[in-house]
Amino acid sequence: MELVHTGEDIEKTGLPPFSPFPGGSFANGGAMWISFLAIAYYNSSSVILRKAVTDAILGSHRHEEAIDFAVVQAASVQYALKLSEPSSFDALTLLYDLEERCNSEAMKNFIKSVCQQILLSPLDSEEDSRILRNNIDVHPRPGSGIGFQIASVHMAPCVLFIVCKYFKNPRLAIQKAIALGGDTDTTAAMVGTIVGAAYGDDHREERGDDSWLFKWTNGLQNGPHGRDYACRLAEKLCKLDVK
């Protein structure tokens, strides 16, 4: 952002020499903040969504794997928003669709591995980290792994595995995301946006214990740009309904 403000072309800021990696950053940052865009584009086609995502992260994340992960995250939020009710969630339907949206073979392969693990893994297990490590460690990326999943291809399976395995209990899903360790705030935020898109929460005090999220959100900072501001912004994003 600083480079763009000082006159650099946004088409170049995400590539060498500004990025230390050939092809640009493969990190998870583009996917981390893309969920807000998915709210506005929840009715758009896969082609329009991919272009919007690519344009949104153009200045910082140009690597094919980073773009794929941002598309995967946005499409997951889009899928969750369009569910008639949370009980209609189908993990394999979602994963098959996400695989088709990817251009990089690495991301396609990681999503395939999540499909296999969802079918084989016990419903509630303390071995989530080990299961994911077995897949992540065989495809190394500099500075990344299950210990800190900075690479898109390492964070994507963590997010998708937890969402698909624990979707029926959104609070548990977020807790399991944190329990994986590593880049916990990113993992939990991305899992939270997907399950939150399906289950929703209007944050009204009268819902009390009937709201799955109320006990967590009620104590959040609520200044000029706090909790209520974020909720109003999300409502405005929904009304955009970009197609």
Image (tube, rainbow, N blue to C red):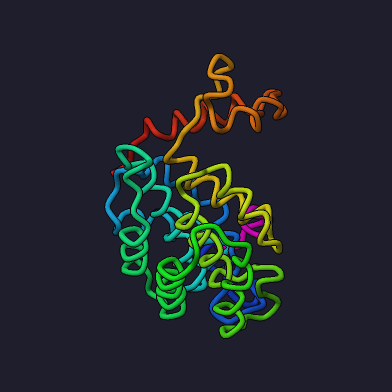
Horizontal and vertical percent position of residue 221: 72, 28
| Extreme residue toward the top, this view | 206
Horizontal and vertical percent position of residue 59: 55, 61
When asked about the image quadrant of residue 236, the answer is top left
The residue positioned 70% from the left and 61% from the top of the image is 181
* Left or right: residue 13 compared with residue 42: right
Q: Which of 87/51 is in front?
A: 87
The residue positioned 41% from the left and 53% from the top of the image is 76
* Left or right: residue 122 compared with residue 185: left
Number of labels in the image equals 0
Horizontal and vertical percent position of residue 217: 64, 30
When asked about the image quadrant of residue 75, the answer is bottom left
The residue positioned 58% from the left and 63% from the top of the image is 28
Q: Which of 204/221 is in front?
A: 204
Horizontal and vertical percent position of residue 20: 67, 77
User: What span is in magenta?
Assistant: 1-9
Q: Quadrant of the C terminus?
A: top left
The answer to whether 99 is drawn above or below residue 56 in the figure is: below
* Left or right: residue 140 compared with residue 100: right
In the rendered structure, does residue 217 fall within the stretch colored magenta? Answer: no
* Left or right: residue 93 compared with residue 7: left
Q: Quadrant of the N terminus?
A: bottom right
Q: Which of 62/141 is in front?
A: 141
In the rendered structure, does residue 2 fall within the stretch colored magenta? Answer: yes
The answer to whether 36 is drawn above or below residue 54 in the figure is: above
The residue positioned 69% from the left and 24% from the top of the image is 222
